[in-house]
Image (spheres, rainbow, N blue to C red):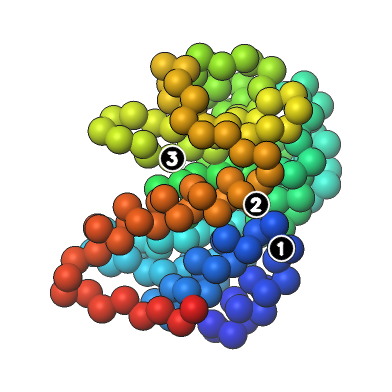
Amino acid sequence: MNETIKNRISNYPLELDAIKHQCLKYIANNSKIGSGDELFIFHRPWIAPMNWGILLFPPVTNDWIQTFESRSDKAIPSFYVDFLNEINGCFIYDIALYGITSSIVNAHQTNKSSVRAQDLFRANLSWIQEYQVEYSFFHFGTSHYSGKEKLGYFADGNNEIFSMLQNGTVISTWKNFADFLQDEIARSEEKMKFEIPPTYKIKMEY
């Protein structure tokens, strides 16, 4: 099973190296492939019996991208189209990067998997209004910041990426998606490590 997962991850482009690194690092901890072809990596039973630190969803189809852009009246930035063509949304520790769900095609369509990415369409329709940010910007993810504060991830009209608190405070900016992934995943991993009980021995391969 792990070899199958490794083979899939190895095909990710260079821009997704930060995700690849985390997957290979923790893959030995009861990772698996889900019924909907999702990758469940790094089982964390101390949080919940069915909790994994990393959950990657299979690639999106081009018609879903076209439908999203038509219905949302927003163009998906090129860096995020490339991401969706590899991973249609994911959870990495406390980070959620949104994906296009089946509801974009058919609101009554059921997903054969019991899990799904957080909804990119809903994020750009309504969740974006929780932040003091221009509505035309592209909202593609979120993570925990501190206390009850939520950190949103956005791209402006020039495809520059930034993170922002709901009160409008910009925390960080990036020129490209690879640097964004590197910094935010490293930050999230450090927080995650403090949650591991000392009685658990984590296997690391990479």
| Residue 31: % across, % down | 46, 74
Q: Tell me whether circle 1 and circle 3 mark residues in contact (CB < 8 Å).
A: no
Q: How many marks?
A: 3
Which labelled disc corresponds to residue 103?
A: none
Foreground disc of the pair 1, 3? 1
Per the image, label 3 sits on a secondary structure element best described as: strand
Q: Residues within 10 Å of mark 3 (few under 14, many from 20)?
A: many
Q: Is residue 103 left or right of residue 150?
A: right
The residue beneath circle 2 is 178
Q: Which one is in front, 132 or 46? A: 132
| Residue 122: % across, % down | 59, 28
Per the image, label 1 sits on a secondary structure element best described as: helix
Q: Residues within 10 Å of mark 2 (few under 14, many from 20)?
A: some
Q: Earlier in the sequence, mark 1 or mark 3?
A: 1
Per the image, label 2 sits on a secondary structure element best described as: helix
Q: Tell me whether circle 1 and circle 2 mark residues in contact (CB < 8 Å).
A: yes
The residue beneath circle 1 is 14
The residue beneath circle 3 is 143
